[in-house]
């Protein structure tokens, strides 16, 4: 698993099975909100129903700063 973070978009993505290929995520469950409504969670699944990743919007509101600091930046480098 790898956590990526885009500080401009304030979005984090937890890759469950490595980087996603174009079109690999064919199904989503979205608009799940964290307690207090501070963040939004989206789950990505493949055709077989296997979980591929978890996207967190407004990530800095719901993920500890030290965790985001260890995440890979959206350009592939460490924060």
Image (cartoon, rainbow, N blue to C red):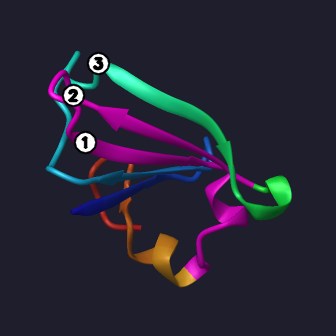
Q: Secondary structure at mark 2?
A: loop
Q: Secondary structure at mark 1?
A: strand
Packing grade of label 1 (10 A; few <14, some 14-19, many >=20) is many
Q: Are marks 3 and 1 in contact (CB under 8 Å)?
A: no
Report the residue at 67% width, 66% height from top: 62
Q: Which residue is mark 1?
A: 52
Q: Are marks 3 and 2 in contact (CB under 8 Å)?
A: yes
Quadrant containing the C terminus in the rendered view: bottom left
In the image, 52: left or right of 4? left
Residue 72 or 39: which is nearer the viewer? 39
Q: Residue at x 18, y 42 (%)?
A: 19
Q: Is residue 54 magenta?
A: yes
Q: Is residue 7 left or right of residue 12?
A: right
Q: Are marks 1 and 2 in contact (CB under 8 Å)?
A: yes
Q: Earlier in the sequence, mark 1 or mark 2?
A: 2
Question: In the depicted view, which residue is nearer to us: 38 or 10?
Answer: 38
> Badge 2 is on which residue?
46
Residue that lies at the very extreme toward the bottom in this rendered image: 66
Q: Residue 26: give its label.
A: 3
* Whether residue 66 is situated above or below residue 28 in the rendered picture: below
Outermost residue toward the right?
Answer: 36
Q: Is residue 69 above or below residue 37?
A: below
Q: Position of residue 67 (x, y in %)?
A: 47, 78
């Amino acid at each position: 698993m790898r956590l990526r973070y885009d500080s401009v978009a304030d979005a984090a993505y937890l890759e469950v099975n490595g980087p996603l290929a174009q079109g690999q995520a064919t199904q989503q469950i979205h608009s799940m909100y964290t307690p207090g409504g501070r963040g939004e969670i989206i789950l990505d699944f493949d055709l077989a129903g296997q979980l591929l990743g978890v996207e967190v919007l407004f990530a800095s509101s719901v993920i500890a700063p030290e965790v985001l600091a260890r995440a890979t930046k959206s350009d592939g480098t460490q924060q």
